[in-house]
Amino acid sequence: MAAVPLLASAAALLALAAAAWLWDYAVVRLLWRPRAVAAAFRARGVRGPPYRFLSGCNGDMRRMKAEADGATMDVRDHDYLRRVIPHFLAWKEQYLPTKSNRLKWMLEKKLKTALTAIIQLRLASKGSGYGDDLLGAMLEACCMTEQGEKQDELTLAMDEIIDECKTFFFAGHETTSHLLTWTMFLLSVHPEWQERLREEVLRECGKANPTADTLSKLKEMTMVLLETLRLYGPVMIMLRKPISDIRLGNLSIPKATGIVIPIPILHRDKEVWGDNANEFDPLRFENGITNAAKTPQALLSFSIGPRSCIGQNFAMLEAKSVMAMILQKFSFTLSPKYLPTASNRQKWKLERKLRDTLVQIIQSRLGPEGSLYGNDLFGLMLRACIPTEQGGKQQQLSLSMDETIHGCKTFFFAGHETTALLLTWTVFLLSVYPEWQERLRKEMTMVLLETLRLYSPAVFTQRKAMTDMAVGEIKIRQGFGIVIPFAIMHRDKKIWGDDADEFNPLRFQNGVTKAAKVPHALLAFSVGPRSCTGQNFAMMEAKSVMAMILQKFSFTLSPDYVHAPVDLLTLQPKFGLPVVLKLLVECT
């Protein structure tokens, strides 16, 4: 019987331990700490993207990288930051107290102050009315009681009213500019319609500024704008919630169920718009909106019903006016763009081969036939991992086999991949700048250092503050993680000069410490006690390989090369670096 209380006590202890672990991991690490860190930085004037439970900011990072991945670059354009680390640049522009951000925050403050003054002025003169515009109508509604009587207190907070004012501006400005942008795109792709619209504008308006009367006569302009709204409407989806149980065909939708209406899909439905639903054909609106499709209210760009856009007529007048003035004076075409795609993979097979090879090497070093672990980095790691009390050799690792293999991979990756990439980007830069290829046969170090500056294998590094510290005016607490973006710092014109985005090895002619305005500006190997232990060997290795190549060959970029640097743990050419090699004997 005594065993029962004992089991109950053990279960209670286990439950307590599990609860403590859950509290530490889930609540402290995943909920409290990220928010506490963000709050601490906010108090010091440093903002950042919002934290999301479990995923942090990883989703935003992946999305921005995917969006940037399609763009290619000119071979003499070395500013690859927007391709490789778009999230750093976006967050820097959005959150850091840069000159532009301080200006933006100041303007936001001014806008809020101005809107507050306007609202308070309207409220003070409520006896004569709040005004006959949208703001007046909103204030009128906010100051009404349920019985329809006026009251002094607003039903919305001041910040909510200000946000609504911003919404008025956004809805009335951004959407119209969007319509004008896509109209110019379609008229560039279809120049025959650009010419038709120009003839109509000159016929109805001449060279004078358009008036309300002349704008009403621009029938073909209206057709083109409506077709643009159909193909490239500003709003992708509408959200609606039924106020009662409804039916859509055979589908029953309960009251208050959220409904997403995908406007672009509906605007391309061939059953509604005909077989040419994916084509640009303004003539479909020749007889008006209601006769353009098989159902009278098929165009949903301004929505329909009581919640349709209240400014749609003004938006159309505004768009007509702007397009008319552009067409009176200009013709326009699209600028050319390139979007290459490629992929390849063989990862699991190579990983399995690598693991088998490393296991054999580790076991041979641990075996009794070997008296030493080896005098290389791997040997040093094994010696540190398996010490005995007497300092002798033993066969039992204090690390698991997988952990040891990961250490080996790190040696290989840090000692091979980075040097290989240094050589790759050096060959690239020497192909683009052949005058330096000839000079390099005499001087090598400057070019390798400049390659490391422009195309460093590591795009960023991470560090953790061991004590409370300050970076400029920003205080960083002990234990905070810090990301140091090499690629951005290596292009800082305040440090490297106005030619920071250019290939100029001569900046290193007086050594690394005098190449920039601060002595430790080159961070390709990091600095301090955690700098790369193999940096001298890596430079010797790179010099040796480049020297042997330059002794026998000259090289140029292949016509097939596409300049698209990509961050795959290290900075690599996305589509490889095809070059054309020529024997020097052949060249001479």
Image (cartoon, helix red, strand yellow):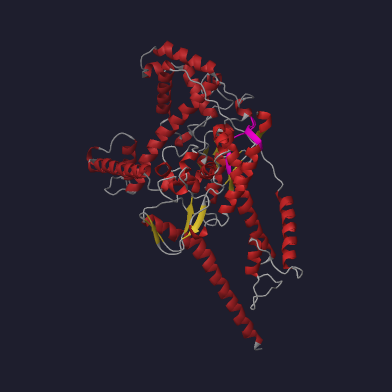
Q: Give the answer, above or below, for where 433 lies relative to 144.
A: above
Decide which of 12, 551 is in the foreground and name it. 551
Q: Where residue 125 appears, x then y in whole percent?
A: 22, 40
State the quadrant of the N terminus. Answer: bottom right
**Is residue 340 in view?**
yes
Magenta span of residues: 552-566
**Is residue 70 in view?**
no
Which picture quadrant has residue 141? top left
Q: Where residue 144 appears, x then y in whole percent?
A: 32, 45
Q: Where residue 420 appears, x then y in whole percent?
A: 63, 46
Q: Give the answer, above or below, for where 402 lies relative to 239.
A: below
Which picture quadrant has residue 407? bottom right
Q: Is residue 558 magenta?
A: yes
Decide which of 329, 341 is in the foreground and name it. 341
Q: Is residue 163 magenta?
A: no
State the quadrant of the C terminus. Answer: top right
Tell me what residue is drawn at x 71 percent, y 53 percent: 351
Q: Where residue 423 appears, x then y in whole percent?
A: 61, 43
Decide which of 484, 520 is in the foreground and name it. 520
Question: In the shown orientation, is residue 122 left or right of residue 22?
Answer: left
Tell me what residue is drawn at x 42 percent, y 28 percent: 315
